[in-house]
Image: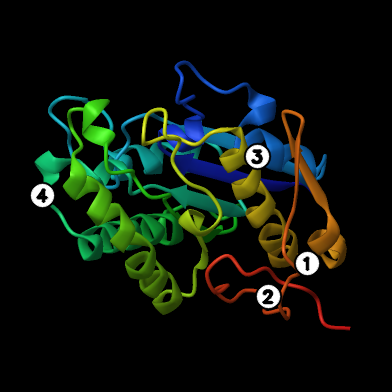
Amino acid sequence: MMKHILCFGDSNLFGSNPSGGRWPLEQRWTGILARSLGEDYHLIEEGLGGRTTIFDDPLEEDKCGVRQLPMLLHSHRPLDLVILSLGTNDCKTLFNTSARITAKALEKLALVVRNYPYGEHYTTPHVLVVAPIHIEERVGEFFPSFDRSSHLLSKQLGPAIKEMAERNNLLFLDASLVAQSSPIDQLHMDRDGHSSVAAALLPMILDWFGDERFLDAGDQEIKGGGETEKEAAPSSRRRGRVPQGFKLFKKKS
């Protein structure tokens, strides 16, 4: 049976190219992941540059994630998994927030997914939370809404979001352990970053759905725009539980 996965995030899900424009679908982590998962999976890409978790940005209107998510849950039914990949734009200086607040905001989004009234003919999807890559120190030279404090805050997001995910039994990936912002604009991923995020997510998703292909995920090559990477060997299988950092699963014999 077809599995439907909604990917809900910001510009690094949209695929903003640090040099300008947008990475082609086949080079974005969503496109790479969709191709690797294959025809039994339907990956829905809902990335929006500037999207926050719960904040209204007066400089970039209509970017509040918690207001947009319910509409997308409804329009993309049925859903089996929702990937929440947000937090970078919460680090804008005008929000003056903290890592704990962003983690709490992502918890609110996860509860929106869990509690949404899908209807009697639809199941409730599970949630996978992706903590964002780190913002680099010189980001303010390219984006006026960020400064060095944004860089420092972004480095605190992973542990705070991980704790929230564990507490709520959500799947979790800390993208900063596998990818980084490009030195070109200090904020967005290059092609290698997109490929690495896809490589880290693939065995987690295969494992969650009980897809037998995850047995070989540790040796699988993930290709994005001509780039090839191999992931580290997976750890023991813990289906439905939170992976530690970006450690991967492997089914027990």
Q: Quadrant of residue 228?
A: top right
Q: CA distance from mark 4 to mark 2?
A: 37 Å
Give whichever of discs 2 and 1 has the lower sequence position.
1
Location of mark 3 (residue): 43
Residue 96, numbered label? 4
- Element type at mark 4: loop
Of mark 4 and mark 1, the one earlier in the sequence is 4
Residue at the disc numbered 2: 239
Q: Quadrant of the C terminus?
A: bottom right
- The residue closer to the viewer here, 75 or 29, is 29
Going by the numbered disc 2, the residue's amino acid type is: Arg
Residue 217, horizontal then vertical, whole percent: 80, 60
**Residue 208: image x %, image y %?**
69, 66
Q: Which residue is mark 1?
A: 210
Q: Type of residue at label 3?
A: Leu
* Disc 2 to disc 1: CB gap under 8 Å: yes
Mark 4 crowd level (few <14, some 14–19, many ≥20, 10 Å Cα):
few
Tag shown at residue 135: none
Seen from the viewer's position, the closer of residues 72 and 94 is 94
Judged from this view, the residue extending furthest toward the top is: 21
Identified at 55% across, 37% down, the residue is: 76
Q: Amino acid at mark 1?
A: Gly
